[in-house]
Amino acid sequence: MATLPYVKIDYGNGALGQAIASADSLLCLVVVGAVAVADTFTLAQHYALRKYGDLENMGITADNNPEIEKLVSDFYKEAQEGTKVYLVGYPDTLHMSDVLEKTNPYARNVIEATNGEIRGLIVTKKAGAQPDIENGLSSDVEASKLAAQELGNWATEVRFAPIFTLIDGLNYQGDPEALEDMTKQGYNRVGVVIGASSAGSANQAIGLIAGRIAASSVQRNIGRVQDGALNVLALYAGDKPIELADIETLVNKGYITFRTFTGVSGYYIAGDPLATKPTDDYNAITRRRVIDKAYRIAYAVLIEKLIDEIPVNTNGTMIETYARAFELAVENAIVTNMTANGELSTDPSDSTDRGVTCKIDRTINVLATNRVGAELRVRPHGYAKYINVLLGFTVTQN
């Protein structure tokens, strides 16, 4: 049976050996439990924002849509005005997991309508008066993680537009011991945020996380201290101030949360973990964004070569000069769009190190199979998460 010609890229995992100019930062803010506003804000329709003031033109206020107002306000506390972000609202009759389900016409429709332009979804929901709690959070959070992972896989495999999703740790009860240990899960396109700007808030400060992501290049960890404190006066985990909360347990269980530092004013993001095992190469937002950008660049180059003529040797394999040209086309595109921006790691002592290698499989009989195989590897940056120092006295003897 004939098969429609295609380009398929699979993610290689395990290579890092971890023990335990583009729309790179374009996100979509998804609010479940939104309210339509006359003819200026319609549910299930995405809108492009570039500043907080755009809400006024849409008739959205803290009175008629408090979750939207808070989310967008927090976003632009961290992202500069002019930063593009999409906003979409859905009725309160839906759950976050409903919106994220890949077979439902909600988040999937936004991905398709924007032609895969979106890099990440930021999902929250209006809290109900009597929430259904499971493992210390809204019972819908677990289902939402599964749906978000499957949606991300669908966007990658079908639309060639990989995304990640961050989910509001809705109705966090303040007990980190009750939470699911996400470092034992396998959702490497999904993160859950815990930490709010008011004590006991059902909704977490997911807008601050989104704004910091939008303000950061793909390789930049959102917890980077040099980027400064968050623009917020107070943060809480449940009803406890962040300063008094058990942040270590939250971090150890793989949640995105906040922290403070002794002697340093302000609040910082404690890290960027995703809901997956520590040995997963794509266990953090930085890793996810870097590899997904490489994917998009490689796809853009390779799609141009689809059904192109390939000169072959007498045994049907690709000739060497063409194979090398094929490799360089992919490598050069990634060098230009990533390495040159400092988004990949290189060895400055090696002038040939470009942070990326593409290798064509020269053993494949292209003439017989009409198939080209390649392996693409990019090198991410390491991060100084743990700094150990031996401190002592120096004594000089006379």
Image (tube, rainbow, N blue to C red):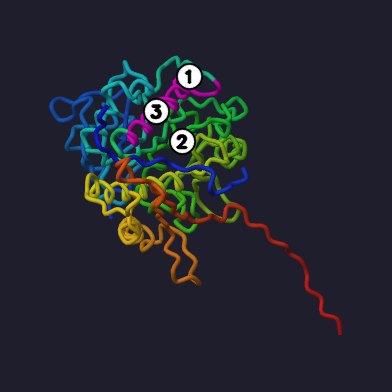
Residue type marked 2: Gly
In the image, residue 140 above or below residue 231 = above
State whether residue 317 is above or below residue 30.
below
SS for callout 3? helix
In the picture provided, is 248 more to the left or to the right than 81? Answer: right
Image quadrant for the C terminus?
A: bottom right
Q: Which residue matches tag 3?
A: 150
Please say whether residue 148 is one of the residues in the magenta stretch.
yes
User: Splitting the image into 4 quarters, where does residue 45 fall?
Assistant: top left
Q: Distance between the residues labelled 2 and 1?
A: 16 Å
Q: In which quarter of the image is the N terminus?
A: top left
Instruction: Locate residue 155, reporting x and y percent.
Output: 32, 34
Disc 1 residue crowd, few under 14, some 14–19, many 20+, Cα 10 Å = some
The disc labelled 3 sits on which kind of residue?
Glu
Q: At which x and y percent is residue 119?
A: 33, 42
Q: Earlier in the sequence, mark 1 or mark 3?
A: 1
Q: Give the range drawn in magenta.
A: 135-157
Name the secondary structure under disc 1. Answer: loop
Q: Residue furthest front?
A: 314
